[in-house]
Image: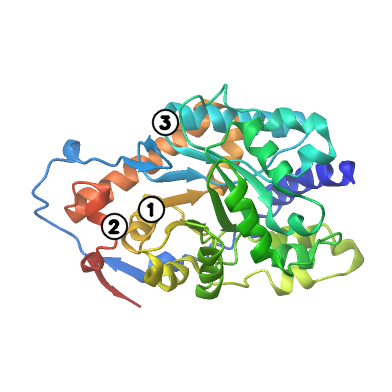
């Protein structure tokens, strides 16, 4: 099991490298049109893009979303470069699933990142379904402690598990177990999908379980269903292709989450391509915006390469705020007057 879990991480990376269509490029945010200000009445240099998240100040609302982890030199390089870049630019970073560190202890090094990012927000990550396969509060706390994390993602991936050859598909009774982890962990628990979105029913169950942060992770970006297809296509199994576009598009997931803004905070991820999509997400109610795919190849190269991509996203985000006449992130948040219309 340990070798299988570890090898799967590399197989996922190779699938993304070899198949550009794993990024579904849904462009759902393109359907939203924003109001331009020819007279913004502020200076570009005056714009404040900073915000607070989990008690720490971030430079702008970017989260480098969960990618990978495991006992392989490439994986260790990727995570180290991501952590260094996140620290240098003041953005948040979430690691990939830490399950592998329990099946292959040598993988722990890929998650031991606090020395590379001593100040910024780091999020641990465990699959919620693993609570039905022997994981408990102890493993969740170990995942947080190793990373010295500011919070823990419990990720929800029923589609990925359903199409995965060795998938864990017993998602029954998880609400109570999630509630137990949320109550017992010494850091906040965040619920996250991995690319199919969270529905109002999911949010309501999460809130009832004590969750106060949700990463909606809708469809339109990386398709884990298609990625898993590459691991089973030799057997002629096309289930992953059939469901490659399944899910709630991220802008729609944000709209569905709006009635719960007084009870929880929301992270937008899944199909965000640039700083303009980030601005649209904040307008729709996202406190933070997650991206992963744009950083994978740069992270294979160097922390400097990742920093360049982050700084480009910051410039895009700031420029969009300037052209909307918005001086700070709070003025963007839930400001639907900035939306001209949708097609």
> Of residues 275 and 251, which is closer to you in this image?
251
Q: Are marks 1 and 3 in contact (CB under 8 Å)?
A: no
Q: Are marks 2 and 1 in contact (CB under 8 Å)?
A: yes
**Residue 144: where, in percent of width, then height?**
63, 37
Q: First in sequence, mark 2 or 3: give its number.
A: 3
Q: CA distance from mark 2 to mark 1?
A: 8 Å
Describe the element under mark 2 as helix, strand or loop: loop
What residue is pinned by disc 3?
A: 89
**Residue 205: where, in percent of width, then height?**
56, 69
Residue pictured at 69% horizontal, 36% vertical? 142
Q: Nearer the viewer, mark 1 or mark 3?
A: 1
Q: First in sequence, mark 1 or 3: give its number.
A: 3
Residue pictured at 21% horizontal, 68% vertical? 337
Q: In the figure, residue 141 lies in which quadrant?
A: top right
Is residue 200 rendered to the left or right of residue 245?
left
Describe the element under mark 1 as helix, strand or loop: loop
Residue pictured at 58% horizontal, 51% vertical? 183
Is residue 235 rendered to the left or right of residue 70?
right
Compared with residue 43, is residue 179 higher up or lower down, i.e. above or below? below
For the C terminus, which image quadrant? bottom left
Q: CA distance from mark 1 to mark 3?
A: 18 Å
> Of residues 96 and 143, which is closer to you in this image?
143
Is residue 288 visible in the rendered structure shown here? yes
Is residue 219 visible in the rendered structure shown here? no
Q: First in sequence, mark 2 or 1: give its number.
A: 1
What residue is pinned by disc 2?
A: 333
Q: In the figure, residue 340 lies in which quadrant?
A: bottom left
Residue pictured at 38% horizontal, 37% vertical? 58
What residue is pinned by disc 1?
A: 287
């Amino acid at each position: 099991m340990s070798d299988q879990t570890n090898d799967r991480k590399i197989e996922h990376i190779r699938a993304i490298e070899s198949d550009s269509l794993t990024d579904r490029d849904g462009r759902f945010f393109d359907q939203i049109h924003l109001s331009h200000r020819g007279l913004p009445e502020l200076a570009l240099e005056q714009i404040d893009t900073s915000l607070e998240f989990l008690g720490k100040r971030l430079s702008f609302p970017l989260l480098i979303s969960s990618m990978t982890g495991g006992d392989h030199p490439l994986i260790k390089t990727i995570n180290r470069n991501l952590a260094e870049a996140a620290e240098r630019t003041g953005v948040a970073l979430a690691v990939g699933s830490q399950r592998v560190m329990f099946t292959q202890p040598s993988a722990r090094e890929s998650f031991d990142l606090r020395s590379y990012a001593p100040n910024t927000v780091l999020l641990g990550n465990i699959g919620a379904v693993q609570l039905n396969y022997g994981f408990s509060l102890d493993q969740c706390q170990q995942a947080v402690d190793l990373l010295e994390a500011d919070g823990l993602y419990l990720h929800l991936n029923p589609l990925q598990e359903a199409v995965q050859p060795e998938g864990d598909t017993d998602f029954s009774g998880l609400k109570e177990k999630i509630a137990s982890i949320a109550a017992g962990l010494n850091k906040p628990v965040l619920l996250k999908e991995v690319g199919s979105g969270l529905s109002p029913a999911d949010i309501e169950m999460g809130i009832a379980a004590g969750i106060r942060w949700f990463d909606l992770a809708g469809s339109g970006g990386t398709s884990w269903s298609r990625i898993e297809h590459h691991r089973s296509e030799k057997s002629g199994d096309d289930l992953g292709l059939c469901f490659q576009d399944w899910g709630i598009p991220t802008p729609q997931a944000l709209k569905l989450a709006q009635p719960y803004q007084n009870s929880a905070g929301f992270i937008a991820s899944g199909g965000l391509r640039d700083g303009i999509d980030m601005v649209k997400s904040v307008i729709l109610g996202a406190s933070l915006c997650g991206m992963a795919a744009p950083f994978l190849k740069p992270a294979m190269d160097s922390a400097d390469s990742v920093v360049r991509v982050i700084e480009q996203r910051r410039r895009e985000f700031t420029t969009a705020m300037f052209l909307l006449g918005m001086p700070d992130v709070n003025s963007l948040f839930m400001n639907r007057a900035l939306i001209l219309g949708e097609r």
